[in-house]
Amino acid sequence: MISIRETSENDLGNVKALWADGDVMLFVGFPNGLQQSDEDMKNWYERIKSARPNINHYCIFDGCTYCGESFYQIDPKHDNRAALDIKLFSFARGKGIAAQGLSYAIAEAFKHGASAVWVDPSPKNVKAIALYKRLGFVEKALPEYLRGGETESLYFELTPNNT
Protein backbone atom coordinates (compact mmCIF):
# COMPACT_ATOMS: atom_id res chain seq x y z
CA MET A 1 0.00 0.00 0.00
CA ILE A 2 1.39 3.39 -1.03
CA SER A 3 1.52 6.14 1.59
CA ILE A 4 2.68 9.71 1.14
CA ARG A 5 3.44 12.04 4.00
CA GLU A 6 5.08 15.35 4.68
CA THR A 7 8.82 14.92 5.14
CA SER A 8 10.05 15.09 8.72
CA GLU A 9 13.53 15.34 10.19
CA ASN A 10 13.43 11.57 10.71
CA ASP A 11 13.29 11.11 6.91
CA LEU A 12 16.52 12.94 6.11
CA GLY A 13 18.60 9.76 5.86
CA ASN A 14 16.20 8.37 3.26
CA VAL A 15 16.24 11.58 1.22
CA LYS A 16 20.03 11.77 1.45
CA ALA A 17 20.32 8.19 0.12
CA LEU A 18 17.88 8.98 -2.71
CA TRP A 19 19.88 12.02 -3.80
CA ALA A 20 23.16 10.07 -3.60
CA ASP A 21 21.86 7.53 -6.16
CA GLY A 22 23.26 8.36 -9.61
CA ASP A 23 20.42 6.55 -11.37
CA VAL A 24 17.87 8.71 -9.54
CA MET A 25 19.77 11.95 -10.17
CA LEU A 26 20.86 11.27 -13.76
CA PHE A 27 18.29 13.52 -15.45
CA VAL A 28 18.86 16.41 -13.02
CA GLY A 29 22.54 16.64 -13.84
CA PHE A 30 24.16 14.46 -11.16
CA PRO A 31 24.96 11.12 -12.83
CA ASN A 32 27.10 10.15 -9.83
CA GLY A 33 24.46 11.26 -7.34
CA LEU A 34 24.45 14.33 -5.14
CA GLN A 35 26.52 13.86 -2.01
CA GLN A 36 25.23 15.84 0.97
CA SER A 37 26.45 15.97 4.55
CA ASP A 38 24.06 15.45 7.44
CA GLU A 39 24.40 19.17 8.18
CA ASP A 40 23.50 20.03 4.56
CA MET A 41 20.39 17.87 4.85
CA LYS A 42 19.36 19.41 8.15
CA ASN A 43 19.78 22.95 6.71
CA TRP A 44 17.77 21.97 3.62
CA TYR A 45 15.00 20.56 5.80
CA GLU A 46 14.86 23.69 7.98
CA ARG A 47 14.43 25.82 4.82
CA ILE A 48 11.56 23.59 3.66
CA LYS A 49 9.92 23.52 7.09
CA SER A 50 10.09 27.30 7.54
CA ALA A 51 8.58 27.96 4.09
CA ARG A 52 5.56 25.64 4.39
CA PRO A 53 2.94 25.71 2.88
CA ASN A 54 4.43 27.62 -0.10
CA ILE A 55 7.05 24.90 -0.38
CA ASN A 56 6.64 21.31 0.68
CA HIS A 57 8.37 17.98 0.35
CA TYR A 58 6.82 14.54 0.72
CA CYS A 59 8.17 11.05 1.31
CA ILE A 60 6.62 8.17 -0.60
CA PHE A 61 6.47 4.68 0.91
CA ASP A 62 5.32 1.28 -0.32
CA GLY A 63 4.40 -0.31 2.97
CA CYS A 64 7.44 0.43 5.15
CA THR A 65 9.84 0.79 2.21
CA TYR A 66 10.94 4.30 1.26
CA CYS A 67 10.52 4.72 -2.51
CA GLY A 68 11.22 8.39 -3.15
CA GLU A 69 10.01 11.95 -2.93
CA SER A 70 7.67 14.52 -4.40
CA PHE A 71 7.91 18.26 -3.98
CA TYR A 72 6.31 21.56 -4.93
CA GLN A 73 7.37 25.19 -4.64
CA ILE A 74 4.89 28.00 -5.26
CA ASP A 75 6.43 31.16 -6.75
CA PRO A 76 4.44 34.22 -5.60
CA LYS A 77 6.52 36.47 -7.90
CA HIS A 78 5.23 34.61 -10.96
CA ASP A 79 1.48 34.26 -10.57
CA ASN A 80 1.72 31.55 -7.90
CA ARG A 81 2.96 28.98 -10.40
CA ALA A 82 4.42 25.95 -8.66
CA ALA A 83 7.45 23.94 -9.71
CA LEU A 84 7.05 20.20 -9.14
CA ASP A 85 9.50 17.38 -8.79
CA ILE A 86 9.43 13.65 -8.20
CA LYS A 87 12.24 11.18 -7.76
CA LEU A 88 12.00 7.44 -7.20
CA PHE A 89 14.50 4.67 -6.68
CA SER A 90 14.63 2.33 -9.69
CA PHE A 91 12.91 -0.51 -7.79
CA ALA A 92 9.81 1.69 -7.35
CA ARG A 93 9.39 2.68 -11.00
CA GLY A 94 6.80 1.23 -13.33
CA LYS A 95 4.31 0.49 -10.52
CA GLY A 96 2.14 3.62 -10.57
CA ILE A 97 3.94 5.07 -7.55
CA ALA A 98 5.16 8.14 -9.44
CA ALA A 99 1.64 8.99 -10.58
CA GLN A 100 0.38 8.75 -6.99
CA GLY A 101 3.27 10.77 -5.56
CA LEU A 102 3.04 13.50 -8.17
CA SER A 103 -0.76 13.66 -7.96
CA TYR A 104 -0.46 14.16 -4.22
CA ALA A 105 2.00 17.05 -4.62
CA ILE A 106 -0.22 18.59 -7.32
CA ALA A 107 -3.30 18.48 -5.09
CA GLU A 108 -1.35 19.99 -2.18
CA ALA A 109 0.07 22.78 -4.37
CA PHE A 110 -3.41 23.71 -5.64
CA LYS A 111 -4.84 23.48 -2.12
CA HIS A 112 -2.23 25.99 -0.97
CA GLY A 113 -2.84 28.53 -3.73
CA ALA A 114 -0.92 27.46 -6.83
CA SER A 115 -2.46 28.86 -10.01
CA ALA A 116 -0.68 26.23 -12.12
CA VAL A 117 1.95 23.55 -11.62
CA TRP A 118 4.84 22.88 -13.96
CA VAL A 119 7.66 20.47 -14.66
CA ASP A 120 10.73 20.82 -16.85
CA PRO A 121 11.93 17.33 -17.76
CA SER A 122 14.95 16.51 -19.85
CA PRO A 123 13.84 15.50 -23.37
CA LYS A 124 15.76 12.26 -22.74
CA ASN A 125 13.51 11.34 -19.80
CA VAL A 126 10.80 9.79 -21.96
CA LYS A 127 9.16 7.88 -19.10
CA ALA A 128 8.68 11.07 -17.08
CA ILE A 129 7.29 12.89 -20.10
CA ALA A 130 4.80 10.07 -20.70
CA LEU A 131 3.73 10.30 -17.03
CA TYR A 132 3.20 14.05 -17.23
CA LYS A 133 1.08 13.68 -20.36
CA ARG A 134 -1.01 10.92 -18.70
CA LEU A 135 -1.66 13.28 -15.78
CA GLY A 136 -2.92 15.98 -18.15
CA PHE A 137 0.12 18.24 -18.40
CA VAL A 138 0.33 20.27 -21.60
CA GLU A 139 3.63 21.13 -23.26
CA LYS A 140 4.13 24.88 -23.63
CA ALA A 141 6.89 27.34 -24.40
CA LEU A 142 9.28 27.87 -21.51
CA PRO A 143 8.29 31.10 -19.73
CA GLU A 144 10.77 33.93 -20.08
CA TYR A 145 11.51 34.08 -16.36
CA LEU A 146 12.72 30.46 -16.42
CA ARG A 147 15.08 30.98 -19.33
CA GLY A 148 18.75 31.35 -18.72
CA GLY A 149 21.82 29.26 -18.99
CA GLU A 150 22.05 26.31 -21.28
CA THR A 151 19.17 23.95 -20.79
CA GLU A 152 17.61 21.19 -22.81
CA SER A 153 14.53 21.04 -20.63
CA LEU A 154 11.01 20.95 -21.93
CA TYR A 155 8.19 22.71 -20.12
CA PHE A 156 4.84 21.13 -19.21
CA GLU A 157 2.07 22.83 -17.28
CA LEU A 158 -1.13 21.80 -15.56
CA THR A 159 -3.86 24.11 -14.29
CA PRO A 160 -6.79 23.26 -12.03
CA ASN A 161 -8.95 23.28 -15.17
CA ASN A 162 -6.84 20.46 -16.68
CA THR A 163 -6.96 18.13 -13.68
Image: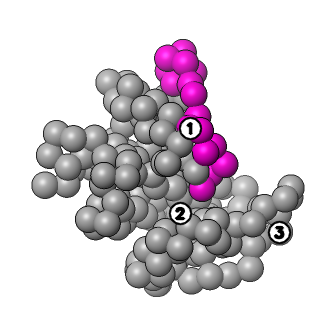
Q: Where is residue 14 in the image (x, y as percent from the top left)?
A: 36, 32
**Quadrant of the snapshot with the C terminus:** bottom left
Q: Does the magenta stretch include residue 34?
A: yes
**Amino acid, disc 1:** Gly
Picture disc at residue 33: 1
In this picture, residue 135 sits left or right of residue 158: left
Q: Distance between the residues labelled 2 and 3?
A: 19 Å
Q: Is residue 96 above or below residue 64?
A: below
Sequence-earlier tag: 2 or 3: 2
Picture disc at residue 114: 2
Q: Is residue 57 magenta?
A: no
Q: What element carries label 1?
A: loop
Magenta stretch, residue numbers: 27-43
Check disc 3 and report the residue beneath it.
144
Q: Residue at x 32, y 24 (%)?
A: 10
| Camera-nearest residue between 96 and 119 | 96
| Camera-nearest residue between 142 and 97 | 97
In this picture, residue 160 sits left or right of residue 66: right
Q: Which residue is drawn at 58% across and 75% down?
A: 157
Determine the residue located farthest toward the top in the rendered image.
39
Mark yes or no: residue 22 visible.
yes
**Amino acid, disc 3:** Glu
Dividing the picture into quadrants, the one containing residue 110 is bottom left
Dividing the picture into quadrants, the one containing residue 98 is bottom left
